[in-house]
């Protein structure tokens, strides 16, 4: 995919700049599997860009049939703003209203909630990234798995990080992976592993192993579990769920990390052959919260620049900004500051996309809809309520849509020329 003349793209963008609503993105939720080709996502032979959102609450809410309209509303509002990808949880382990209430035992009503989410995404032309377990205690996470091994199997475990090491705990996780991937959707009649609505699986939400800062534990776990997923499902892409912290494989890059040492390694973890694309998360308001607004934006720029370069030249894989946002709970918060952060992230995606770079999209944290106010952690975005941030999001959808459209047109012209050349050669013969 070579760069096309920028003035041509710019002319189109200026000409069509008023048309922010994109109700149908070419290549919807159920229309073909997303693939990778080098540093790009591809769908049906054309470049694919993800302007999307996180909504961890979808399955939980859809498990109650009387609340499913909220999921439908969220997808409809997302579609109206041109969003193409949603990231959500395919886990809820132990505790209140679990999906998996004990190792290998599942709540069918909760699973039907996830079935509904996938079905609705398909109807609205939205792809899904489904995360398979949490690093944190919310919705059970690795702590619940370790507790199950202690109480059910008499395992002597001293750390929640034994999730990554203990064979019994790993067996519980392996069983969950197999159960989810092989699930038969009660709404669509399609097994999850065969459903093109799903763009990718995520091994874990933000894996961390602070007990082994060398990174060897996480590296071994990702390698093992990525191989497992691919042995079951070769249709879908796979990512690890990483935040993007650098590790010992690139010591010169670790200075870019906030003061966090969590046992992951952006380069080494993403070089694993069964990991199809890299992810990075961006929370300068949490990671460098003692800095002022301009210093936080400077951190964000450096953070993204480094990861995009490494995705292109070190990993040679696409990269997705899988989480970013700004909380209204931050001291001195203003909508202008949030828009500034969104514009910074989204413009970097756009400039990478227009030159054929590896940055293939961003998913803001998090989308909410009417009636979901209690789920607002400070980062919630209500697309159903007119706001400057919703306008920033819609503009990005429009620009990425146009880039994809232009690339598709160029590809079609090349195919037409090749076909005409082949016909001409046959006639000449």
Image (cartoon, helix red, strand yellow):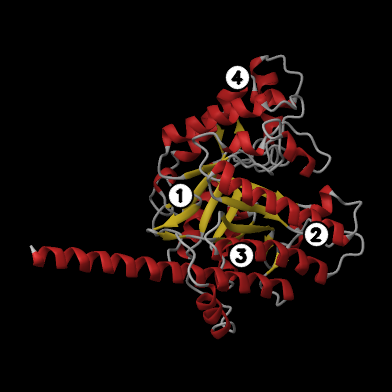
Whether residue 339 is visible to the viewer of this picture, yes or no, is yes
Going from N to C along the chain, the mark reached first, 1 or 4, is 1
Proximity of marks 4 and 3: CB atoms separated by less than 8 Å: no
Q: Secondary structure at mark 1?
A: strand
Whether residue 329 is visible to the viewer of this picture, yes or no, is no
Proximity of marks 1 and 3: CB atoms separated by less than 8 Å: no
Proximity of marks 1 and 4: CB atoms separated by less than 8 Å: no
Going from N to C along the chain, the mark reached first, 4 or 3, is 4
- Looking at the rendered image, the quarter that the C terminus falls into is bottom left
Q: CA distance from mark 4 to mark 3?
A: 46 Å
Q: Name the one closer to the observer, 26 or 376.
A: 26
- Looking at the rendered image, the quarter that the N terminus falls into is bottom left
Proximity of marks 2 and 1: CB atoms separated by less than 8 Å: no
Dot in front, 3 or 2: 3
Q: Name the one closer to the observer, 231 or 11.
A: 11
Going from N to C along the chain, the mark reached first, 4 or 2, is 4
Q: CA distance from mark 4 to mark 2?
A: 44 Å
Q: Secondary structure at mark 3?
A: helix
Vertical order, 57 against 80 (above or below): above
Residue 140 pos. (x, y %): 69, 36
- For the point 47% across and 57% down, the residue is 119
* Numbered tag placed on residue 36 in the rendering: 1
Farthest residue to the front: give it: 428
Q: Residues within 10 Å of mark 1 (few under 14, many from 20)?
A: some
* Numbered tag placed on residue 48 in the rendering: none
- For the point 47% across and 39% down, the residue is 181
- The residue identified by callout 2 is 297
Vertical order, 327 against 424 (above or below): above
* Numbered tag placed on residue 351 in the rendering: 3
Q: CA distance from mark 3 to mark 2?
A: 17 Å
* Numbered tag placed on residue 168 in the rendering: 4
Q: CA distance from mark 1 to mark 4?
A: 34 Å
């Amino acid at each position: 995919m070579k760069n096309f003349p920028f003035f041509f793209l710019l002319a189109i963008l200026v000409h069509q700049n008023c048309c922010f609503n994109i109700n149908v993105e070419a290549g919807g939720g159920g229309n073909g599997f997303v693939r990778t080709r080098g540093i790009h996502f591809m769908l049906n032979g054309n470049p694919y860009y993800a302007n999307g959102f996180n909504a961890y609450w979808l399955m939980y809410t859809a498990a109650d049939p009387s609340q499913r309209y909220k999921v439908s509303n969220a997808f409809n509002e997302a579609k109206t703003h041109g969003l193409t990808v949603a990231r959500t949880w395919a886990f809820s382990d132990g505790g209140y209203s679990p999906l998996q209430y004990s190792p290998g035992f599942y709540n069918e009503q909760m699973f039907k909630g996830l079935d509904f989410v996938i079905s609705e995404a398909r109807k609205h032309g939205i792809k899904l990234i489904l995360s398979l377990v949490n690093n944190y205690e919310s919705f059970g996470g690795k702590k619940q798995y370790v507790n199950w091994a202690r109480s059910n199997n008499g395992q002597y475990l001293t750390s929640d990080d034994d999730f990554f090491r203990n064979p019994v705990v790993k067996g519980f996780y392996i069983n969950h992976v197999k159960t989810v991937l092989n699930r038969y959707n009660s709404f669509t009649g399609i097994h999850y592993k065969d459903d093109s609505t799903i763009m990718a699986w995520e091994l874990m939400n933000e894996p961390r192993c602070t007990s082994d800062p060398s990174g060897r534990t996480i590296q071994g776990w990702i390698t093992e579990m990525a191989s497992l997923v691919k042995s079951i499902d070769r249709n879908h892409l796979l990512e690890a769920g990483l935040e993007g912290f650098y590790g010992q494989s690139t010591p010169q890059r670790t200075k870019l990390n906030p003061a966090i040492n969590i046992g992951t390694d952006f380069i080494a973890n993403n070089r694993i052959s069964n990991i199809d694309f890299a992810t990075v998360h961006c929370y300068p308001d949490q990671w460098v919260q003692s800095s002022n607004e301009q210093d936080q934006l400077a951190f964000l720029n450096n953070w993204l620049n480094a990861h995009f370069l490494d995705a292109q030249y070190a990993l040679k894989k696409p990269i997705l900004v899988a989480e970013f946002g700004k909380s209204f709970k931050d001291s001195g918060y203003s909508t202008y500051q949030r828009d500034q952060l969104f514009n910074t992230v989204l413009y970097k995606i756009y400039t990478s996309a227009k030159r054929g770079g590896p940055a293939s999209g961003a998913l803001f944290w998090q989308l909410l809809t009417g009636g979901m106010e209690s789920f607002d952690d400070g980062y919630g975005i209500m697309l159903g309520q007119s706001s400057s941030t919703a306008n920033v999001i819609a503009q990005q959808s429009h620009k990425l849509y146009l880039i994809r459209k232009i690339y598709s047109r160029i590809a079609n012209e090349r195919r037409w020329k090749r076909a005409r050349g082949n016909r001409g050669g046959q006639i000449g013969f």
